[in-house]
Image: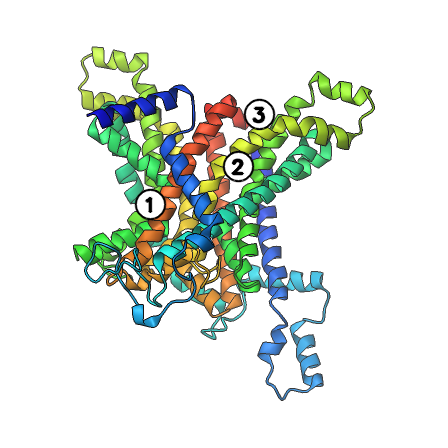
């Protein structure tokens, strides 16, 4: 386990370095930053002086080292659009994205788990068909379009929910549902098949023969044993939510990191783009790492195998 | 009653001959047809509209016009024509993207599986790293540096999908290279390159094809998503994702601008997924269990 853990952590560090290199190299390809920074009347000497001052005349590896050591200290450059440190702009938007992700996870668990369980318990019931339909649609419905359909139904036609921005608890419902949709479908399908496997086992028959109430059999005995694949899925879910947040925040004008990066693209505000990419990639890589470690912990074959 | 019976009879013979599911096949066929003959089928230009004919609703609604059966958008462009040309984009991205991904992924997997040793280690670590990077963010980053374009979308598709091909091909190569025909080819004096291309590759093709068909739907949604957030195909090119984005602000007055292209994506992807499952069940029983 320790060897696996060490290898996996090393890999996460390398991944982060790769992201930082990509960000760094692409930044150099966006053009000479001095052309934007210096006033038109600047002389050649002024430009050369500024170049030396910023270290842009040094070889790339030296520049990369500077970039990394500054980033580690929290200095990601200044936002072109807001003329403030890029990190400050990004941290301001962080809570909104975390809030949205948290609500989406709650919605996924509250919808996916019980519907999956009941679909397995009452096979071929209307609820089972409903859950299978949702699961089949899950992959095919583009999330940005689903968001607009929800806006059309609940915002425009029924007029009961706000369709953009952040504020009251009602504001978060539609974006949360849109973000969670894909995962709801996955969790429903997974819970259903895991429960079906467990419900056919001897110990469930025994529990029923002992005369335990059906509710206890299902929620205590069966679900506990079906939970293993479901737990790892819930962790993977977090990763997919991070990816989805960019799209969903754009649809609902939710003022989080996703919307920030899309705005920054439009303003060609590279420092902010690179800060968001580094922060979100960091979260993504750490979440991936945790999922793998959790999986190895739950599944001895990986722990001792590779 | 007789009609229902004859429909049932057609369905039964269709199923008995183990042909692909009819409806999804028709949908995909229509899509390909639209993409190829877009310039003949589309009643209007997909890019130029007339401002006098803005926001005409589709047939069945008040103020609809026969000339624009599915309505027009805020620039007076014909929705139907844009949908037809949009099929071209979706198809082109998935075709080019998946073919290139298949080539890259299969080459890496083949090399890793055939040579083993440090080549294998390096390739598989690259796969792990690639899988742990967030794809959409990379797309956003690319779009800031190079302007949004078809090429960017294809790069992102390759970046996101090549690891699955590399893993699949490597696994299969490991099994194949133990078999006798490889040693015999070696004895007969074939070079490593010849063995890989002439003897191993044909055996790998079915698995690669299965994976490719299963991924077409995903690539179409990916392209639309990227175009929707403005880092994919740039407007005014009528990508379905661009069309949904175009109608976003008008969802209250003119729902059809966004909803119709989304429906097109939905129907296309469901059909492709069903066909992909069918191909998988026929060509590759091993994948069926997963």
The residue under label 1 is A180
Residue drawn at point x = 76 percent, y = 19 percent: B183
| Nearer the camera: disc 2 or disc 3 | 2
Residue at which label 2 appears: B212
Report x, y in % for residue A251: 34, 58
Q: Report in which chain the residue with disc 1 lies.
A: A
Asked if badge 1 and badge 2 are on a common chain, one would say no
Please give the label number shown on residue A305.
3
Disc 1, disc 2: CB below 8 Å? no
Asked whether A271 or A159 is in front, the reply is A159
* Residue B145 image offset from top left, x and y in percent: 57, 63
Gap in angstroms between the C-alphas marked 2 and 3? 30 Å
Q: Residues within 10 Å of mark 1 (few under 14, many from 20)?
A: many
Marks 3/1: CA–CA distance: 34 Å
Please check whether the numbered discs 2 and 3 fall on a single chain: no
Residue A158 is left or right of residue A144, and the answer is: left
Residue A283 seen: no
- Which of the two residues, A132 or A259, is positioned nearer the viewer here? A132
In the image, residue A36 sits, relative to residue A28, either above or below, namely: below
Q: Chain of mark 3?
A: A
């Amino acid at each position: 386990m320790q060897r696996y853990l060490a290898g996996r952590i090393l890999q996460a560090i390398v991944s982060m370095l790769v992201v930082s290199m990509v960000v760094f190299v692409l930044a150099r390809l966006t053009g000479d930053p001095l052309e934007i920074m210096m006033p038109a009347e600047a002389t050649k000497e002024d430009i050369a002086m500024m170049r030396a001052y910023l270290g842009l005349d040094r070889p790339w590896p030296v520049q990369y080292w500077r970039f990394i050591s500054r980033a580690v200290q929290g200095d990601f450059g200044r936002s072109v659009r807001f003329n403030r440190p890029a990190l400050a702009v990004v941290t301001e938007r962080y809570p909104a994205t975390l809030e949205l992700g948290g609500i989406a996870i709650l919605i996924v668990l509250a919808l996916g788990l019980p519907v999956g369980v009941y679909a397995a318990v009452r096979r071929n019931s209307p609820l089972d068909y409903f859950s299978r339909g949702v699961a089949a649609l899950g992959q095919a419905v583009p999330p940005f379009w689903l968001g607009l359909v929800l806006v059309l139904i609940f915002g425009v036609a029924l007029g009961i929910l706000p369709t953009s921005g952040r504020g009251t608890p009602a504001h978060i419902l539609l974006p949360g549902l849109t973000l969670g949709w894909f995962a709801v479908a996955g969790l429903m399908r997974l819970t259903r098949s895991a429960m079906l496997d467990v419900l056919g086992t001897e110990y469930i028959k025994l529990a029923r023969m002992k005369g335990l109430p059906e509710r206890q059999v299902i929620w205590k005995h069966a679900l506990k044993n079906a939970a293993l694949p479901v737990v790892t899925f819930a962790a993977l879910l977090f990763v997919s939510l991070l990816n989805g947040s960019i799209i969903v925040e754009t649809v609902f004008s939710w003022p989080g990191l996703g919307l920030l990066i899309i705005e920054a693209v439009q303003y060609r505000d590279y420092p902010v783009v690179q800060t968001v990419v580094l922060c979100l990639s960091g979260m993504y890589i750490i979440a991936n790492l945790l999922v793998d470690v959790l999986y190895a912990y739950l599944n001895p074959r990986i722990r001792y195998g590779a | 009653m007789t009609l229902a019976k004859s429909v049932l009879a057609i369905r039964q013979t269709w199923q008995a001959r183990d042909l692909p599911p009819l409806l999804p096949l028709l949908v995909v066929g229509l899509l390909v047809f639209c993409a190829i003959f877009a310039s003949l089928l589309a009643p209007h230009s997909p890019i130029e509209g007339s401002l006098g004919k803005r926001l005409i609703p589709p047939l069945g609604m008040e103020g609809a016009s026969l000339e624009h059966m599915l309505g027009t958008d805020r620039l007076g462009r014909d929705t139907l024509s844009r949908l037809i040309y949009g099929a071209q984009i979706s198809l082109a991205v998935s075709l080019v993207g998946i073919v290139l991904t298949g080539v890259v992924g299969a080459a890496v997997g083949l090399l890793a599986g055939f040579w083993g040793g440090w080549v294998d280690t390096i390739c598989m670590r690259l796969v792990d790293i690639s899988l742990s990077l967030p794809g959409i963010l990379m797309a956003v980053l690319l779009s800031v540096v190079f302007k949004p374009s078809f090429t960017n979308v294809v790069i992102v598709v390759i970046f996101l999908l090549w690891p699955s091909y590399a893993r699949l091909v490597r696994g299969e190569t490991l099994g194949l290279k133990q078999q006798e025909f490889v040693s015999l080819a070696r004895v007969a004096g074939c070079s490593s390159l010849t063995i890989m291309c002439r003897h191993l590759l044909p055996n790998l093709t079915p698995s690669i094809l299965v994976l490719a068909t299963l991924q077409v739907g995903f690539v179409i949604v990916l392209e639309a998503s990227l175009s929707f957030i403005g880092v994919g195909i740039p407007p005014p090119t009528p990508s379905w994702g661009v069309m949904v984005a175009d109608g976003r602000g008008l969802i209250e007055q003119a729902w059809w601008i966004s909803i119709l292209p989304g429906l097109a994506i939905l129907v296309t992807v469901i059909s492709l997924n069903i066909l992909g499952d069918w191909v998988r069940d026929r060509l590759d029983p091993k994948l069926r269990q997963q």
